[in-house]
Amino acid sequence: MNQNIMSKKVKSLADLKKIKADVQQKMKLREQGEHADKMAQIKVAMATCGIASGAKEVMEFIIDELDYRGVDAIVTQTGCMGYCYAEPTIEVILPEQEPVIYGFVTKDKAREIIEEHVIKGEMVDGVIPITFKTIDEEN
Amino acid sequence: MHILVCGGTGCRASQSEQIIQNLNTELQNTNLESDVKVVTTGCFGFCEKGPVIKVVPDNTFYTEVRPSDAADIVNEHVVKGRPVKRLLYKNPKNDYHVTSTSNIDFYKKQIRIALRNCGFVDPESIDEYIARDGYEALGKCIGELSPEAVIATVKDSGLRGRGGGGFPTGLKWEITRNVENEQKYVVCNADEGDPGAFMDRSILEGDPHSVIEAMAICGYCIGADTGLVYIRAEYPLAINRLKIALAQAREYGLLGEDILGTGFNFEIEIRYGAGAFVCGEETALIHSMEGHRGEPTFKPPFPSVSGYMGKPTNVNNVETFANIPVIINKGAAWFSKIGTEKSKGTKVFALAGKVNNVGLIEVPMGITLREVIFDIGGGIREGKKFKSVQTGGPSGGCLTDKDLDTPIDYDNLIAAGSMMGSGGMIVMDEDDCMVSISKFYLEFTLDESCGKCTPCRIGNKRLHEILDKITKGEGTEEDLERLYMLSNVIKDTSLCGLGQTSPNPVLSTLKNFHDEYKAHVTEGTCPAGQCKDLLKYEIIPDLCTGCTVCYRNCPVGAISGERKLPHYIDQSLCIKCGVCYDKCKFKAIRIA
């Protein structure tokens, strides 16, 4: 789109596709929402305790890291998961798999989780055993 | 995170603009304005529960949001990640909260082609449209394909006119193409006149670029360099968004001269209509655009041969156009896989009346009325009994429960005595009187008849008088005969679609609900309890406890009686408002 900054004219189909690729990146979030159940999901606990321990920075890091690696995954925030002693905590859900929760997630840990768990599907150290069951919203 | 807020006319009327403002303020207060984007989109279709908001990527769907809820959405959902439960949609069948759109019955059976971008993109952003494959179809057509090849694709797709007639779109394009003339026109019919129908408005409000792109493609195919959108002036939001979209398309060089460097020129202008139903008919529409009186003229010559300013003109409706870019991008075979043998693709309906989920839906052709009304529509309100469904607006007919399992397509609906029309679908329950319903539709055509043909101008007036007489309990059995005869005369002797179809509501109800008409004329009763002149409210002495509630609520003082003793209604004073019936806790009032 660069050469079009002066005049916004789209001069060819290739130009058009360039704009498309550009904007698509910005709209990725919405596209993901359409088929959320087929993608990896990472939930970052962002209650007071999580934010105080740096969850916001970790979340930003995760988003950037996934973008950088070109991994299609949904990053959302969630409330306190109850493991306040282990903040920041994140929950990783791969399609059709049980959720896994990691505690004490620093940026380095987050990178490791993305590399090993999200991309290769192999769990890494730091898993917190899930001590509760969540009831489905509809039940 | 993106927060998508519906900016369609319906949701705006219930303050969605204020919600957007409040959301932005709240986001600023929490320093999140750079992380969360609030997007104004087109109609989500779920107008009944508006204003609606969708939060992505977690796909949370909020309904009936008020401006004051913005704080909770930001503080709870955005900051803490907890959906705001009280704003979630509740399944009417079991009262459970549903978080995600994919779990809402209303959306489950829908396939959104014409509405693909409604509720997803910001209609005022051409970039977002481009990100959703926008203008790629146009680029492909004018850059790589011959007009004949494009027409062949449209023909093969089996797309038929969505305005009501159901004429094959590709064939129409081919006919217009084959007429030799230096100047030709593409016209988009956005004169949506059916009462309660708002498909075209929603498309123009939610995804105006899809129509612009398709009109340019059509122009390329038929050899036209000018497009005209005929839109009613009472659609201000749609006009506004269309104007913005046109300006953006021009700025990007997707309209104008030498589009995408191919040498193809195309420009679109807007023409305003004053909102006359008859101007949906293409010859009347063209006359109105030319500045003449909006009256239909005899066909042939068809507009394809001699239309706007006497030049070959291709008229298609908004929804038809909205399908075109997808057909080009995904191919005719993909499109024709959806639907029935003779009706391909999907159809947008404005679902209204006595169903739980009122709104705009897009369903594949061939879906049954039962699925639409009971699955998507969520069944009849308050658990009442389904009685009839009216399709096709004032030109259509009323279908009954025996038609519920008929697959919906152009031909089946006509065979059942109704029609597809532009897509109005009004559901009626046991409380609706079919005589009154047909009277209502006739009132509409009576107002909208242009007056050119005597049978339509005067015949419909007489039909209305007879129906009025019947609802007042003064009808006779001969009146039913007369209704039938007169209806057929009007059908046979009117020039345009308006007159030819105006008696349809009468004929279809006469056929499907003959007993109800009979009850009105022979017994002087209205089985649905709607025709006021035929009702009589009575107190059943055995059930009346003398609580005086009816006495105190009667607005005209027609009820009298001693406390703790049965009361009595003075029929000469009663105005049949039904307040006593609604207020009585002991079911001691009956309608005779």
Image (cartoon, coloured by chain):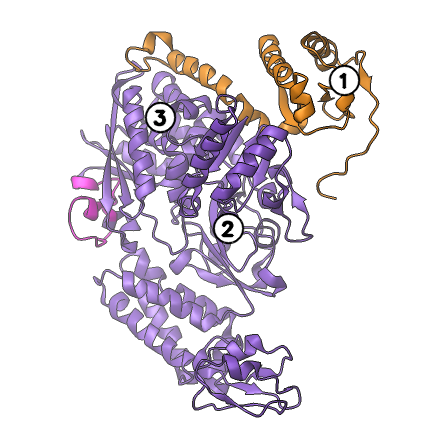
Q: Which residues are magenta?
A: B285-309
Q: How far apart are the alpha carbons under marks 3 and 1?
A: 63 Å
User: Is residue B497 shown above or below B2?
Assistant: below
| Closer to the camera in the image, A11 or B396 | A11
* Number of marks present in the image shown: 3
Q: How far apart are the alpha carbons under marks 2 and 3?
A: 44 Å
Label 2 sits on residue: B48
Mark 2 neighbour density, 10 Å: few (under 14) some (14–19) many (20 or more): some
Q: Are marks 2 and 1 on the same chain?
A: no
User: Is residue B94 shown above or below B37?
Assistant: below
Q: Which chain is purple?
A: B
User: Is residue B316 shown above or below B127?
Assistant: below
Q: Give me the chain letter of mark 1.
A: A
Magenta segment, prevailing SS (helix, strand or loop): loop
Does any portion of residue A39 appear in the rendered image?
Answer: yes
Q: Amino acid at mark 3?
A: Glu
Q: Which chain is orange?
A: A
Q: How far apart are the alpha carbons under marks 2 and 1?
A: 44 Å
Q: Is residue B12 left or right of residue B389?
A: left
Q: Nearer the viewer, mark 2 or mark 1?
A: 1
Question: Residue B369, how many percent across, how many down?
Answer: 56, 54
User: Is residue B486 shown above or below B352?
Assistant: below
Question: Residue B20, how many percent across, how many down?
Answer: 44, 36
Q: Give me the chain letter of mark 3.
A: B
Label 1 sits on residue: A103
Question: Residue B493, how many percent across, how many down?
Answer: 28, 64
Q: Which mark is residue B148?
A: 3
Q: Nearer the viewer, mark 2 or mark 3?
A: 2
Of label 2 and label 3, which has the lower sequence position? 2
